[in-house]
Amino acid sequence: MKKILVALDCSVPSMRAARYAAEIASFLPACHVTLFTVLTGVPHGAKALAEVVSSETTELHGDDDHQQELHEAQNILAEASALFTECGFGSEQLTTLAKPLRRGIAQDILDEAQAHECDTIVVGRRGLSKMQQVVLGSVSRDLIQKGEGIAVWVID
């Protein structure tokens, strides 16, 4: 395991997964981690989203909802980055990304993992009931089903 993608959203399980990944990654000196979040309410093609590195100068042209989502993404990525730093993980081994939704949340996570040549994806389990999974879908289930050749850790 040399490259890990940690998929984040604003949920508690997502941060639990980030904490778990940080604890594991701190024991892997040659490991690189990408913290990634999909911006579901931001149109594809919005400016200044290729890489969000907690920059206060990042601008997003659009309505207040887009600004709010970008701000939340920056906070999530900053909080997860802090978890890795607290566990002794070097900042030079950490990348943070936020990108607009393109092909579906699970597929966008897989696409990003492939683009960064990650061999592991870490994601939190939201604990949806069977009915909620049928209606809403399950990102973790889709990652496991579609993630050929990549390990998917679902943290409860």
Image (tube, rainbow, N blue to C red):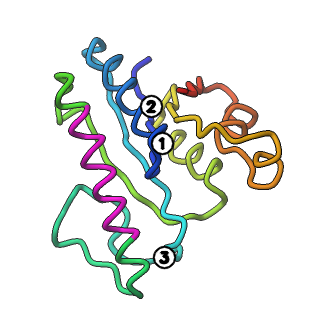
Query: Does the segment drawn in magenta span residue 75?
Result: yes
What residue is at 45 percent from the left and 45 percent from the top? 8
| Of residues 127 and 110, the one drawn nearer to the viewer in this rendering | 127
Q: Quadrant of the N terminus?
A: top left
Q: Amino acid at mark 2?
A: Ala
The number of discs equals 3
On screen, residue 24 versus residue 146, left or right, reads left
Identify the element where label 2 is drawn.
helix
The answer to the question of whether label 2 and label 1 lie on touching residues, with beta carbons closer than 8 A, is: yes
What segment is highlighted magenta in the picture?
Answer: 69-83
Q: Position of residue 143 (x, y in %)?
A: 66, 37
Predominant SS along the magenta part: helix
What residue is at 26 percent from the left and 37 percent from the top? 94
- Which numbered marker is on residue 7? 1
Identify the element where label 3 is drawn.
loop
Seen in the picture, residue 84 relative to 135 is either above or below; the reply is above
Q: Quadrant of the C terminus?
A: top right
**Category of crowding for the residue at label 2, using alpha-carbon neighbours closer than 10 angstroms: few (below 14), some (14–19), many (at least 20):** many
Q: Which residue is mark 3?
A: 45
What residue is at 75 percent from the left and 49 percent from the top? 137
Identify the element where label 1 is drawn.
strand
